[in-house]
Image (spheres, rainbow, N blue to C red):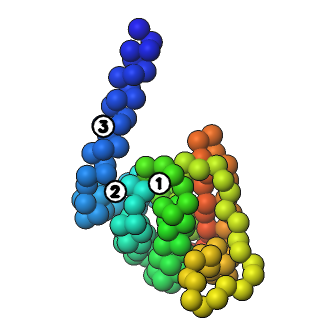
Amino acid sequence: MSSLVTEASWMCFQEALAALERLSSKELEHMYFDRLSDESGPGEVRLPSRPESGPLARRLVLSVLQTWELHQQLEVGELLTSELVANAVRHAAGRTIGLQLARKPGWLRVEVRDSSRALPCMILADTSPVNERGRGLRIVDDLADRWGADLMPRGKSVWFELKVRERH
């Protein structure tokens, strides 16, 4: 009986993944905005692990930051999110990636989660101007106030934090 339940659960999960992958970026954006912008707690959303998820993640982060009135963080938040999502899509083998935003006093945190347990490493050597790859984490390191990667039970989370000026 237990194996039947497990198999049924796995099939439901696979069907949900397939349905997620069929949604357009606009449909995903509409579906996820409220969950990400809720300041009461971090809400993770799952995006298909495909190149089109980069622009979608940027739009979602921009919309949330505007809603939270963090206008001073729009440009850097968008850029750093783009770098982390691009890395997750390029290097992790999973079908989805997670995006999570959290706000705590004085800080904004953006996390991108994927199914790979391989931690990212920053390339310190100069890269040629012709090769655009390998610069993502250097950009994150230069622009974020803090960043890191955490192993999770099923994959990892790569995150950055930005200081924010709180309104009084």
Q: Is residue 146 left or right of residue 78?
A: right
Instruction: Identify the residue shown where x is 63% and y is 40%.
Output: 153
Q: Residues within 10 Å of mark 3 (few under 14, many from 20)?
A: few
Instruction: Identify the residue shown where x is 39% and y is 22%.
Output: 7
The image quarter containing residue 15 is top left
Task: Name the mark on residue 97.
Answer: 1
Secondary element under disc 3, as helix, strand or loop, is helix
Of callouts 3 and 1, which one flags the residue occurring earlier in the amino acid sequence? 3
State whether residue 168 appears in this view: no
Q: Position of residue 59 (x, y in %)?
A: 36, 72
Q: Which residue is mark 2?
A: 32
Quadrant (top left/top right/bottom left/bottom right) for the C terminus: bottom right
Q: Which residue is mark 3?
A: 15
Q: Residues within 10 Å of mark 2 (few under 14, many from 20)?
A: some
Mark 1 in CB contact with mark 2 (< 8 angstroms): no
Of callouts 1 and 2, which one flags the residue occurring earlier in the amino acid sequence? 2
Of callouts 2 and 3, which one flags the residue occurring earlier in the amino acid sequence? 3
Three-letter code for the amino acid on which mark 1 is drawn: Ile
Three-letter code for the amino acid on which mark 3 is drawn: Glu
Instruction: Identify the residue shown where x is 55% and y is 60%.
Output: 91
